[in-house]
Amino acid sequence: MVKNNAIHERGYVYNFHYHLVWVTKYRREVFTTPQLVADMLEILNTTANDNEITIEEAKVMPDHIHLLLSFKPKYAPANVVKILKGASARTWFVAHPETKRLLWGGHLWSPSYYMGTLGDMSKETVADYIRNQRTERGKVGRPSKKAN
């Protein structure tokens, strides 16, 4: 359930999103037609749906991918990247084997990627919130340690 932009699951509530970018091997322009772009978007969406990953925004560029993602905290970000890149490459080459000749060595993706986290609040907002917590607040409702 989504409430106040937070996702409520059994045992935890989370509200984080990741900006993920990766490039094709050798920055080769593979996704050069609207149909190739649509095919990759479909592959990414299917892979995400099969693996409890939510793609909130996606853009397929000729030589790279931008995704805005969210996924359950039980999944490691590096594993999510591995799933998306690995499954999309395998599925892509089944559907478009002709593109392998553009990529020496037959790999669709470069091994590197960029991933950044975002949420509803900036880093500065959270840091200020933490810095400004009152230490006495945590003691409200607790018995006094005064000597009897």
Image: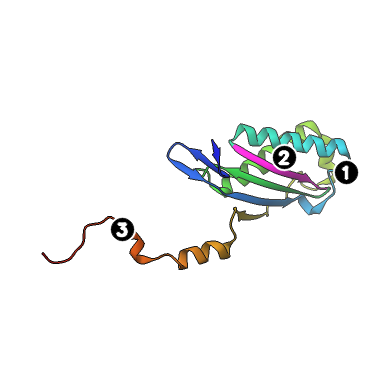
Report the amino acid beneath label 3. Answer: Val
Which residue lies at the image location 67% right of the left edge and 41% below the top edge?
55
Question: Residue 11: percent from the left, percent from the top?
Answer: 42, 39
Q: Work out how far the residue at label 2 is from the one at label 1, CA to CA, in angstroms.
A: 16 Å
Question: Residue 92: percent from the left, percent from the top?
Answer: 76, 36
Q: Work out how far the residue at label 1 is from the one at label 3, CA to CA, in angstroms.
A: 62 Å
The residue indicated by pointer 2 is 89
Where disc 2 sits, the SS reads helix
Residue placed most toward the observer, 96 or 41: 41
Which residue lies at the image location 53% right of the left edge and 47% below the top edge?
76
Q: Is residue 79 left or right of residue 43?
A: left
Report the amino acid beneath label 1. Answer: Thr
Question: Residue 81: percent from the left, percent from the top?
Answer: 63, 46
Q: Could you classify mark 2 by the number of other residues whose Cα lies within 10 Å: few (under 14), some (14-19), or many (20 or more)?
A: some
Determine contact: label 2, label 1, CB under 8 Å: no
Q: For residue 145: magenta? A: no
Mark 1 vs mark 3: give the one in front.
3
Q: How many marks?
A: 3
Where 98 falls versus 16 (above or below)?
above
Secondary structure that dominates the magenta span: strand
First in sequence, mark 2 or 1: give its number: 1
Question: Residue 127: percent from the left, percent from the top?
Answer: 52, 65
The residue indicated by pointer 3 is 140
Report the amino acid beneath label 2. Answer: Ala
Which residue lies at the image location 64% right of the left edge and 37% below the top edge?
48
- Residue range highlighted in magenta: 53-61
First in sequence, mark 1 or 3: give its number: 1
